[in-house]
Each structure stands twice: as structure tokens, then as C-alpha cells.
Image: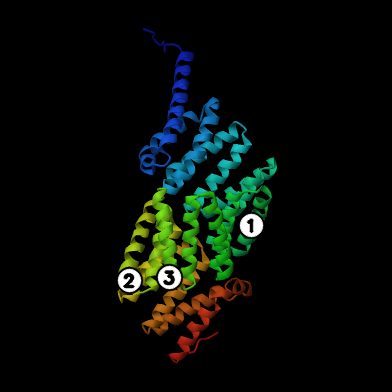
Amino acid sequence: MASLNLNDTPSRIYFFQQTIYANLHFWQTWLKTHLAQPEALDRERHALAKAISFALPLDETWSLVFELVQTLTPLMERRGHWDTWQWVLTRSLETAQRVKDTAAEVTLSALLARLLFQQSQFKKGVAGYRRTLRLARQIGDRFNEARACTNLGYHFIEHGYWQRAEVLCCHALALFEQLDSNHGRAHTENHLGFLYTRQHRWEQAQYHLERACEIWQAMADGYGLMLGYLNLGGLYNDSGKPDRALNYLAKGLQQAEQIGEFVAIGRIYINQGKAYRLLGDWAKAEVCTKQAEAIFQQCTNLTELARSWNGLGLIYFHQARWTEADFYLEKSLGLWRSLGIQFEEIELLLDIGECELARGNAPEAIRRWQEVEQLISPPPVQQIYRHLQPRLHQYHHKLNSMGLELER
């Protein structure tokens, strides 16, 4: 029977290197049969991260490690395993730099930036995408240049930098058209639809979101369709058509459950909660929004957590559950302020002020109005938030009808 001598250092090194190499091959083979089993990935995520961490110091295994990290990243991101995977991506990026694999460095930099945004680390995420753009342009990687532009544009939309977002997304769309990339084209159309929803440009939003869904439908891309249905649901909620929103959100939820989504399901629940709130079905609205809150507490997505608290506050207000309403609305306001997302702060201040008007609390309604006025008074800011003018006029009219005059 053959024996292995591990008494000398070269033999030990060779043995451990071969063990690491075999372990990587095992996980590659395992993934081929478990990619569609998210629960299995959940169970094995620490073992996968450990296999990668042992292999990273070995230059000989880099190509296998990079392939494994690329495959796993979207899956780990969608399941909410962000802290573990941030470590993996950070170490992998350092390895790509060490072995001077600039193409891999571009890809990993983009993946890490996207994950940082999920974790509400806005400044680090922006820096990551800017680095991706610089590296991609250095090596002529136009696809990753376009991908970084559209993804950075999306995150600028989320944080209220809408003019920058539109420039980035339009540049990305032009690049994807030149590259004939349906994948990139669909995601960028989706981002533009999301942007125009934020700005209340309903027809343009619908046009771009439907274009995205058409491309994804032709590609049989279930994940993409889920995103499109989610954003169409958001569009119809915001434009006052909650029944139609629920139809799209139901389709999105079905897709999300089929592909084992976790984070996106929380976003769908938030939108379903909003639709039921607009329809006056407080019980269903609360159930959906509470489900969303639980998901975003688990994965620590602060922006979506703030949205879920906002929704709960409004649901409780309309049921005259004042203590709970005040608690959640103030929690949401504090979180938006700490994140520095001004447009969400403005919209929530209007929500709170309108609630105070409805229960006849004129002093508090005036105070909230004044806070909004202070935020939007600079002319450049007024231009950005011009879509809020009808709501502001209605708010002002209600105060006047109560015999109160505001100092403008």
C-alpha cells in the first residue's frame, strides 16, 4: 500500500497544495448540480468561503478561484450573505492585484462596489465604481465600463443624484447598443424606467420598463423579468394605480420564489404593502410591510429598512394607532437623515405633515412644512424636485383652509 511521506517541507507543501486544488474542483463540480438550490448554497456558504480563502495565496489556483467567485457572487448577494461575501471579494481583489490580472481586477472591483451599495456604504461604493471605470478604460473593456456606468447610475437614482444618473445610464445604453449586449441594454432600460418613476415622468418610465421586460422575456431571463415586474409595480403604485401594481408585483413574487431570491422578495413585499395601503386594506398592508422589515433587518439593508418603517408608520396612522405611527415615522426619518438621502427625507416630511393635517395638528404640520421649505428653497434644488409642486400646493391649500397662513 502506497504511503505519503510528510516529514520534509516540500512534501508537506505539495500535499496541501494538491488538497486545496482538489477541494476547489470538488466545489466547482458541486455547484453545477446545486446552482438552482439556494437553500443548499445557504448551508454551504461558509465552506465555500473557506475553500476560496485557502486557495487565494496560491497563484496556481487563481483562475479556478476567480471563476468560482464570479459564479457565486450574484447568488450570495441575492441571498443576503453580504458580510461573508464582502470579505471574499476584498481578498480576491487583492489577489488579482498581486498576480497582475487587470481584467479580473475590473470585474471584482465592480462586484465589490455593487455589494457595498447593498450594504448602504455609499461613498465606498462610488469609489469602487470609479476605480472600475478607470481600470476598464485603461484596458479597453467597454462592457465593464458600460456596466459600471449603469450600476453607478442606478445607485445615484437611489440617493437622489438624478441628473448624474441619467447621464451615466444614457452613456451606458449607447455603449451596450454598440456592443449589441441585450443583457446590458435591458438592465439600463430598467434603470432609466426606475429614474423616470422617481421623477414622476410616468410615460417615459413605462416605456423604458416595458422595453426592459420585452428584452428579458425574449432572453427567458427570469431574474431580469422579476426586476422589471418589481419596478412596474413601483411605477403603478406611485402613479396611483395600486390594483395594476399588485398584478405586476404578484408576477414578480412568483419569479423571485422560483429563482430563490431573498432580498428582492423584501422589496416586493414593501411595494405590495404600499399598494394595499393605497387601497385601504390595512391588515394586508401591515403583514406585507412587516415581512419586508424582517428581511431587511436580517441582511442590514438600511435604505429598504427605512422604507419599511415609513410604510408601517403610515399604515398605523390611518388606523389611528398614533403611538406606533409616530414611532415608525420618526425612526424612518432619522435613518434617512443619517444616510443623507435628501429626497427621501423630503417625501417623508411631507408624509408626516399630511398626517398631522389629517388629525388637525396645525402647529406640527406647519413645522414639517417649514422643514421641507428649508430643504427645497435653493433654486437648483427646486428644479430637481419640481415634480413635488402639485403636492406642495395641495398641502399649502389645506393649511389655508384651516385659517392658517404660512410665512414664505
Type of the residue with mark 3: Pro
Sooner in the amino-acid sequence: mark 2 or mark 3: 3
**Mark 3: few, some, or many residues within 10 Å (few <14, many ≥20)?**
many
**In this rendering, would 326 be left or right of 137?**
left
Which one is closest to the eye, mark 3 or mark 1? Answer: 3
Type of the residue with mark 2: Trp
Task: Please say whether residue 331 is visible from this viewpoint.
Answer: no
Alpha carbon distance from label 2 to label 1 = 39 Å
Q: Quadrant of residue 12?
A: top left
Which one is closest to the eye, mark 2 or mark 3? Answer: 3
The residue drawn where x is 51% and y is 28% is 57
Task: Residue under label 2, please give it.
Answer: 282
Q: Secondary structure at mark 3?
A: helix
Task: Residue under label 3, please give it.
Answer: 242
Residue 144: x, y in percent?
A: 62, 46
Residue 300 vertical position relative to residue 92 in the rendered view, above or below: below
Task: Residue under label 1, please give it.
Answer: 168
The residue drawn where x is 35% and y is 71% is 315
The residue drawn where x is 64% and y is 55% is 173
